[in-house]
Image: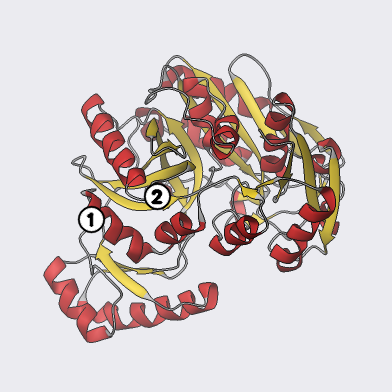
């Protein structure tokens, strides 16, 4: 087992990793930018190293500065968390070159799943269902138009190096194709320095359902059931839950088997997720793989009573996977609490928190790094807390979440708590009648 792990991240996920490391008897190193010197992950780590100014490019995204922190603290492993360098094959490779264990997959595995085209080709070879599409990068508008007619509209153009909805456009008819193609390529180039575009059939009213997987260094892969992530805005998840209200036992078995097959196809090592789109007829299609721990991992932890960060560290240390496939025994739901104003297009709301009281009680968990007096910097992701509730049934879980949201007090900034309070009361949400476009018609704004 490792003696000291450097956490190449910030905020709540850094604090989350520190807690598990402490329980495992592993020392921790926090890295931080000057904007994060007052963050709790800095306070609770055994050591802390400032790695630069607020800009991510000069701190959390700087491989050179993070590796310097590894060297001066004699850490023998690095946990990347999620975001920043978590899916950066170059970072994983540098760690390997210096004999530092990257707690995650190999550089080759990251590269195979990081490029959408390569990932899709790998899944086709493995027999995992994929969305009909171009099967590779589109070379020009004329080829795209011809293929769109063959597949049938609507189609969606996607950046091969994309993520977070960047470089993505839905096309409903021939006349829209060329403008969408030009816009998607420009956006992809600006966001990822790669204007490669591919095309898929656009699945209308889809569910976004992902399967948690874990693979060890001995070729064994298991799944830890699903999470429904369909409540999202501009491809950013806001609420996740398990089990999915759309799931059947037969569908869970089929999707779980496909997820295991997908991870086995690249000999996956570590924890990760296989993400699927599921249409209203319960046909499912591989979308992508996230080769890291995810924001919503507590949902899975709560329904199967299992520490995913601990499992991730044990796998990286060469231990075999703990147990077989796992299935939910409870219902859990996570609301992401963001420093954003829902009444003004979810614009960021950085600033000083003047009052803070997190929810408590049986079956209620809050993962956060903020506190009263903490100043939320404007430089990073706006998520400041995750509120997770667990109960025997979905109905009980929603009632518990309503109560927990009512108790969640954050003053001094705007947050998404009011949005979640309205969502929990929505009749269609309570019945499980939603898809990824649900928030386009959901009225969540306060009346002026």
Residue depicted at x 37% and y 63%: 116
Residue placed furthest toward the left = 150
Pointer 1: residues within 10 angstroms few (<14), some, or many (20+)? some
- Quarter placement of the N terminus: top right
- Residue 25 higher or lower than 293, as above or below: above
Q: Kindly report the distance in space between the C-alpha atoms of the residues bearing marks 2 and 1.
A: 35 Å
Depth check: 164 or 34 in front?
Answer: 34
Q: Classify mark 1: helix, strand or loop.
A: helix
For the question of whether residue 62 can be seen, the reply is: no
Percent x, y of residue 102: 61, 49
Q: Which mark is residue 441?
A: 2
Residue depicted at x 69% and y 57%: 380
- Residue 64 higher or lower than 32, as above or below: below
Percent x, y of residue 7: 71, 46
For residue 429, side relative to residue 285 (left or right): right
Residue depicted at x 68% and y 25%: 359
Percent x, y of residue 51: 81, 59
Mark 2 or mark 1: name the one nearer the start of the chain: 1
- Residue 30 higher or lower than 119, as above or below: above
Q: Which mark is residue 124?
A: 1
Name the image colouring: secondary structure
Percent x, y of residue 284: 24, 45
- Residue 25 higher or lower than 126, as above or below: above
For residue 134, side relative to residue 305 (left or right): left
Pointer 2: residues within 10 angstroms few (<14), some, or many (20+)? few
Q: Classify mark 2: helix, strand or loop.
A: loop
Q: Which quarter of the picture shows residue 415?
A: top right
For residue 381, side relative to residue 269 (left or right): right
Depth check, mark 2 against mark 1: the one in front is: 1
């Amino acid at each position: 087992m490792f003696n000291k792990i450097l956490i190449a991240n910030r905020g709540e996920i850094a604090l989350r990793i520190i807690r598990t490391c402490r329980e495992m008897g592993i020392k921790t190193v926090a890295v931080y930018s000057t904007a994060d010197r007052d963050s709790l992950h800095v306070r609770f780590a055994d050591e802390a190293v400032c790695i630069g100014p607020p800009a991510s490019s000069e701190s959390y995204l700087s491989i050179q500065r993070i590796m310097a922190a590894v060297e001066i603290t004699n850490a023998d492993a690095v946990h990347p968390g999620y975001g920043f360098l978590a899916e950066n094959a170059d970072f994983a490779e540098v760690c390997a070159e210096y004999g530092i264990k990257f707690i995650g997959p190999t550089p080759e595995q990251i590269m195979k799943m990081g490029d959408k085209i390569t990932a899709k080709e790998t899944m086709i070879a493995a027999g995992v269902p994929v969305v009909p599409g171009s099967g590779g990068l589109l070379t020009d508008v004329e080829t795209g138009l011809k293929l769109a007619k063959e597949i049938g509209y609507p189609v969606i153009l996607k950046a091969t190096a994309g993520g977070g909805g960047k470089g993505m456009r839905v096309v409903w008819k021939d006349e829209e194709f060329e403008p969408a193609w030009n816009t998607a390529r420009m956006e992809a180039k600006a966001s990822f320095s790669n204007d490669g575009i591919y095309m898929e059939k656009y699945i209308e009213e889809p569910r976004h359902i992902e399967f948690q997987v874990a693979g060890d260094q001995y070729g064994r892969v298991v799944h830890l059931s699903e999470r429904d992530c369909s409540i999202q805005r501009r491809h950013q998840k806001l609420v996740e839950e398990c089990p999915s209200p759309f799931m059947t036992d037969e569908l869970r078995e089929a999707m779980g088997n496909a997820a295991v097959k997908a991870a086995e196809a690249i000999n996956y090592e570590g924890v990760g997720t296989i993400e699927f789109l599921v249409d209203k007829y319960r046909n499912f299609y591989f979308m992508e793989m996230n080769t890291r721990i995810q924001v919503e991992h507590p949902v899975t932890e709560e329904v199967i009573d299992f520490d995913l960060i601990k499992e991730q560290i044990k796998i990286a240390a060469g231990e075999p996977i703990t147990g077989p496939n796992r299935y939910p025994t409870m219902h859990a739901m996570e609301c992401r609490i963001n420093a954003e104003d829902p009444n003004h297009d979810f614009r960021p709301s950085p600033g000083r928190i003047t009052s803070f009281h997190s929810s408590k009680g049986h079956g209620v968990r809050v993962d956060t790094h903020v506190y009263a007096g903490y100043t939320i910097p404007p430089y990073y992701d706006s998520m400041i807390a995750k509120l997770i509730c667990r109960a025997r049934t979905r109905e009980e879980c929603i009632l518990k979440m309503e109560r927990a949201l009512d108790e969640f007090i954050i003053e001094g900034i705007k947050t998404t708590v009011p949005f979640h309070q309205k969502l929990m009361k929505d009749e269609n949400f309570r019945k499980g009648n939603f898809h990824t476009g649900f928030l386009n018609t959901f009225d969540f704004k306060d009346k002026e």
